[in-house]
Image (spheres, rainbow, N blue to C red):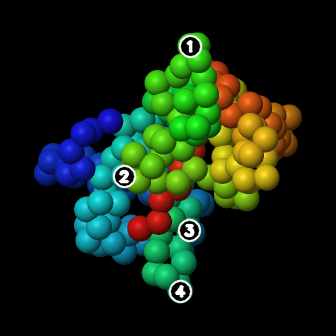
């Protein structure tokens, strides 16, 4: 990830081109929305563009999945076929990371998301994403975990197998090469 929260003109232009190409390729994810409106919003929100750059750089392939007329915000989700490669092998949160005594991963899902300026998908958002395509057929993704589960040391993750979305639990301090996280961002 980039240390500075500012993009160079070249990074900015390349990102906008990438996002536009993905937007135009996957119109079923955002029927009725126009790229020019999305781009205008992005160009006015440099901090959000930086977050999208982080999503892209870590393999998330962010794309627009909705628009809220009340708040005048576009919603982006990570739409990579599998859990983003640059965000795998992480435990759930900072507390879990600190609790690990041996073989600590480099980071946590919640920590990385905060550093990137995004949020982990909720279970509901994850299920909505799966209505737009088939994701995590070989990987899994941490999702926001209710406090009632987290206070017992657990966390939840989701994947798609047998044409069904499954929600599982694991110790929050666990981490696997095939488990990462997907994020959302409102612009």
- Find the distance from the CA under tag 2 to the CA under tag 4: 23 Å
Q: Which mark is residue 70?
A: 4
Mark drawn on residue 179: none
**Of the residues under marks 2 and 4, which one precedes in the sequence?**
2
Q: Nearer the viewer, mark 4 or mark 1?
A: 1
Of residue 129 and residue 179, the one placed in the foreground of this image is 179
Q: Which residue matches tag 2? A: 51
84 or 90, nearer to the observer: 90
Q: Which label's residue is closer to the chain start, 2 or 1? A: 2
Binning the other alpha carbons within 10 Å of mark 1 as few (below 14), some (14 to 19) or many (20 upward) gives few
> What residue does disc 3 label?
66
- Dot 4 falls on a residue whose secondary structure is loop
Tags 2 and 4 in contact by the CB under 8 Å rule? no
Mark 1 — residue? Answer: 103
Q: Quadrant of residue 165?
A: top right
Q: Quadrant of the C terminus?
A: bottom left
Secondary structure at badge 1 equals loop
**Circle 2 SS class:** helix
Determine whether 88 is above or below 117 in the image. above
At 46% from the left and 40% from the top, the residue drawn is 112
Foreground of the two, 102 or 137 = 102
Say which element carries label 3: strand
Q: Nearer the viewer, mark 2 or mark 3?
A: 2
């Amino acid at each position: 990830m980039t240390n500075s929260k500012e993009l160079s003109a070249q990074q900015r232009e390349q990102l906008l081109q990438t996002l536009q190409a993905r937007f135009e390729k996957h119109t079923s994810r955002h029927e009725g929305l126009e790229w020019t409106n999305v781009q205008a919003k992005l160009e006015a929100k440099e901090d959000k563009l930086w977050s999208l750059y982080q999503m892209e750089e870590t393999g998330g392939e962010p794309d627009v999945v909705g628009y809220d007329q009340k708040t005048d915000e576009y919603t982006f989700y990570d739409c990579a076929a599998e859990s983003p490669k640059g965000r795998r092998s992480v435990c759930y949160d900072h507390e879990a990371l600190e609790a690990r005594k041996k073989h600590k991963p480099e980071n946590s899902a919640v920590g990385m998301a905060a550093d990137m300026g995004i949020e982990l998908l909720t279970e509901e958002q994850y299920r909505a994403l799966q209505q737009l395509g088939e994701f995590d057929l070989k990987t899994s993704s941490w999702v926001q975990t209710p406090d009632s589960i987290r206070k017992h040391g657990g966390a939840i993750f989701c994947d798609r197998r047998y044409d069904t979305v499954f929600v599982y639990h694991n110790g929050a301090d666990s981490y696997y090469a095939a488990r990462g996280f997907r994020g959302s961002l409102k612009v």
